[in-house]
Every structure is written in C-alpha cells, then in structure tokens.
Image: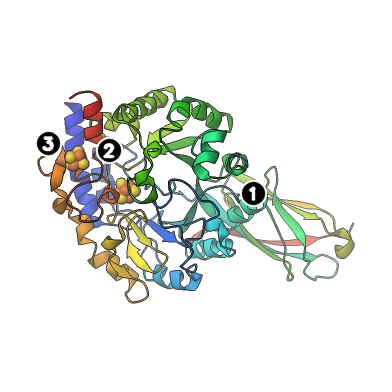
Amino acid sequence: MIRLLKQTLFREFRKFETKQHELNYLFWECTTRCNLNCRHCGSDCSKDSMHKDMPLDDFLKALDTIESPAENFTVVLTGGEPLLRKDIETCGREIRKRGMRWSMVSNGYLYNETNHNSLLNAGLGALTISIDGLESSHNWLRNNDKSFERVDIAIGLAASSSRLNFDVVTCVNKHNFQELEDLRKYLIMKGVKAWRLFTIIPIGRAKEDEEMFLTENQFKGLMDFISESRLKNDIDVKFSCEGYVGRYESKVRDSNFFCRAGINIGSILIDGSISACPNIDRTFVQGNIYTDNFFSVWQTKFNIFRDRSWTKTGKCAECKEYKNCQGNGFHYWHGEKKNVLVCHNEQLKKATNQ
Amino acid sequence: MKIKTKDWKRKIIGGLCLTSIAFVFQACYGTPQDFGNDLLVEGLVKSKKTGLPIKGIKVSVADKVQYTNTNENGEFSFYIEKLQNTKIRFTDTDSTQNYLFSNKDTLVTIKEPLQTSKGAKVYLNIELENK
Ligand code: SF4
Ligand code: SF4
C-alpha cells in the first residue's frame, strides 16, 4: 500500500520535474583522448582522438548563455580522460568563477598528489573514479598491467579529502561478479564512502564480448548483493540510474528510477553537439553550440526526452509497469529505436521465473 | 549572473514523495552532485619591512595537504573546504631567494567570509616579518 502511494506520488513529482526541466547537471565532453584502451570502451563512448579537445572559450560561450543557473548547477567534465587536458584546472576555475560547481570523471591513472592538490585549488567539488575489480580483473578490463596500482593511489587520495563528494563506480561483468564482496571490503579499507555499480550497454565493441554481460541470475545476484550491502551501512552502495528494477527499486537506490536525461541533465559533446548524457545515441542530438544558442536549445527543444510516449513500442508497448519505467534509461534506445535494448525488470522476472 | 533558489513548489512535491533525496541524482557515467561547501581564499603577501610583494611563499591549509604558492606579484588564490575555523599557514619555503621570512599562521573563521552570488570568499593581506 505504502509502496503504491509512493509510486503514485513519485510519478507526479516526475511529471512536475519534466515540465520544469531545470538544467541541474551538464556534461562537458572536454576531450575524447584516452590513456587506456578498455575492453568495455566503444560501448560507452567513442575513444578516438580524431576530434581535437574543445577549446575552453568555446565551451564558456555556451555556458554563459544559461540564464539564472539552478542552485547547485554542476558541470561534469568527462571524456575520454579529462586529466589529459593540460588546462584542466583553468577550465575548472573558469566554471567556478561563474558561481557554478564542477566535477570530474576519471579512470584515475594520472591522478596523483600534485593534481589532486591543483584540482582542489581550482574548486573541484565532486569526483568519480572507476574501478572494475581487484587487481587482475581491473587490469584485464583496462588492458593495462599498471592500472590497478595507479587507481589504488587515486582512490586513496580522493577518499582522504573531506571537501570532495567522491564516489567509485564499477562496471559489473562476468569477470568481476564473484569478487564484489572482496571489492566492497577493499573500498571500505580505502576509506571510500560511496560506491555505484552499473552494467554494460550491449553496443559497440562490448556487444561481441560475452564476458561483459551478466546472466539473468547474475543480474539478480547483483541486485541482492546491493540490497544486502545497503543494510550493512558501512559504505553507501547503490545501483546506478541506468534502469528500472521493479521490486528491487526501493532496495537498491535512494530514490525511484527516474531517467533525467534531457529533463535535468544536458551535455555539450566534443564536436559541440548538444544532447543529454554522453552515452546516449548521437542521433538524439538537439543542436550544436557552434550554430545555436545553447540555452535556447535546452529551453525549447528536447521534446523527445521530455515526452517519452514514443518509447511505448516493442516490448514496452504492452508492459504493465510502463508508468513507473517509461521505457528504461534513455541510453538503451539505439538505431531504429523500435525496441529497448535491455529491460532490467524482464531480466529479474526471468531469474525468478515470474 | 544571478543564481536562483530552487522553486519552493518543487521542494514541496519532492518532499511529498516521502524521500528527502529526490533532488540528489547523478547519471550513470557522471559524478555525485557537489553541494559547494567551499570558500575562495585570495590574498597578497608582502614584506613588512619593504612593503614589496613576495613570490614563492607556500600558502597552506594547516593540518591538510592542500597548498598553493604566491605568484610574481605576491598573490594567491585557491578554493578550500568551508569549515568553522581554518588556519592558513604562510611558509617561506624558498628562503635563499626570500631572505628568510618568518612563518605566519592566520585563522580564517566562518563569520568572516563575504557571501557573494558566486560563493563565499575571503581576502587576506599578509605581511611577513624578516627572521
Ligand atoms: S518493458 Fe519497457 S517499460 Fe516495461 S519494464 Fe521493461 S523497459 Fe520498462
Ligand atoms: S540516459 Fe542513462 S545515464 Fe542518462 S540519466 Fe538516463 S538512465 Fe541515467
């Protein structure tokens, strides 16, 4: 009963948020250069260096079109690997100077004491570092023998800062599934307070690699692992925003599933394209900062993100839980967009023979 | 640029969802949100004796690893965590060039910062004595 009431209220809240569509979170794909060659790459973004890094001034011009930015408006620097940019601190400082907050996603390989200090000096407020298992699994996925050693240093530094809102993310796959409990213990030992787990999108290079994907039973195992870990209270473990997980919703996250892409989340991609999360199919691009006014695109376009009724197709067409899910994470719509690529709820139902 | 406060309607409807964290979100490939608990500390370090700016003075947050250095014009600027009381330490780490200035600790209290639309900041004018 309470669950149903909560769901109804949450749907109203989602409707309200969608109507308001306040921009709270802006990704800036500031480089597509990367220092690693991960196995799951190509699925998440195109790690080519065909594109030059976007000049800071071009990004700032777009940023300055935002009228009355929201309280806690955050620019999330992503890549590629943002630390490959030599002017990363200048970028951060310019954003912070405007009264806006900034944060960064990094693979941790280049994160050391020197840039930990200079990034904090430039007003870095939140940081996410990715780790994909204990030493051998992480190095296997990252295709680099030194990557665990380096990320271990990065995590230690970031976790030692009380200023940073820091978390660690892990892409769960067949290779690291069995070591999640050991990884949890390792992160607690390193002083990490928050850990987010996600799975991989079956596109690009990863699509062909069976090792990358959990079986239905393993996926259910992941939900059980997160639920149980959350009860222990020694580290804030959660499932990422990626998808609707039915009965597990209240057990694996702080809040109900709500894909805020294009509602509160926008992005400026390497070539100036304006979109929502960078992992979304690039055919959903809404404009370009080199030809359009960024904020006016945000205010007047993005209809396809804010009215998701078009996702009522394929397996979502007859789904009884559509009201709560609305076609899963936006990043699961690719190509012809005739069917959602992954339904997490279906995987869970299959695992429990429902 | 004016930063608007979150719409009260949004807060009420979010609150009705029986979850206080309805506004705290992050995309899968993004970071947690930053709630901006920081303070911009800027200033100028001069010699008490000559009145001239001193470059290369280490400006650090006492008991923390964070530090910066004064530039050619004796200026410094960095963001630090906003705490009730923060001790900022000025250390001459370049003594041969700077003629052995004494170290100095300055306490920045939370009541002092200037609240601007772009965040809290404080400006410190520091004079260092010769040893
Ligand atoms: S079928 Fe579609 S709407 Fe239903 S739970 Fe799966 S992804 Fe969501
Ligand atoms: S598109 Fe995907 S990553 Fe972005 S908010 Fe939606 S579910 Fe999260």
Instruction: Classify the position of the C terminus of chain A by image quarter.
Output: top left
Query: Label 1 is placed on what type of residue?
Result: Asn
Find residue A199 and report its image quarter. top left
- The front one of B12 and B59 is B59
Q: Are marks 3 and 1 in contact (CB under 8 Å)?
A: no
Q: Which residue is mark 3?
A: A320
Q: Which residue is mark 2?
A: A256
3 and 1 marks on the same chain: yes
Determine the residue positioned at 22% across, 28% down.
A350
Number of disc labels: 3
A344 relative position to A91: left or right: left
- The front one of A309 and B76 is A309
Q: Earlier in the sequence, mark 3 or mark 1?
A: 1
Residue B40 locus on image (x, y percent): 58, 58
Residue A264 locus on image (x, y percent): 31, 54
- The front one of B18 and B110 is B18
B19 up-or-down from B28: above or below: above
Mark 3 Cβ and ligand 1 under 8 Å apart: yes
Determine the residue positioned at 34% across, 40% down.
B21
Tag shown at residue A112: 1
Find residue A11 and report its image quarter. top left
Question: Subunit of mark 3?
Answer: A
Q: Earlier in the sequence, mark 1 or mark 2?
A: 1
Question: Subunit of mark 1?
Answer: A
Question: How many C-alpha atoms fall within 10 Å of the one at disc 1: few (<14), some, or many (≥20)?
Answer: some
Q: Is residue B79 visible?
A: no
Element type at mark 3: loop
Q: Residue furthest bottom?
A: A291
Instruction: Compute the Cα span from label 3 to label 1.
Output: 49 Å
Determine the residue positioned at 48% across, 53% down.
A103
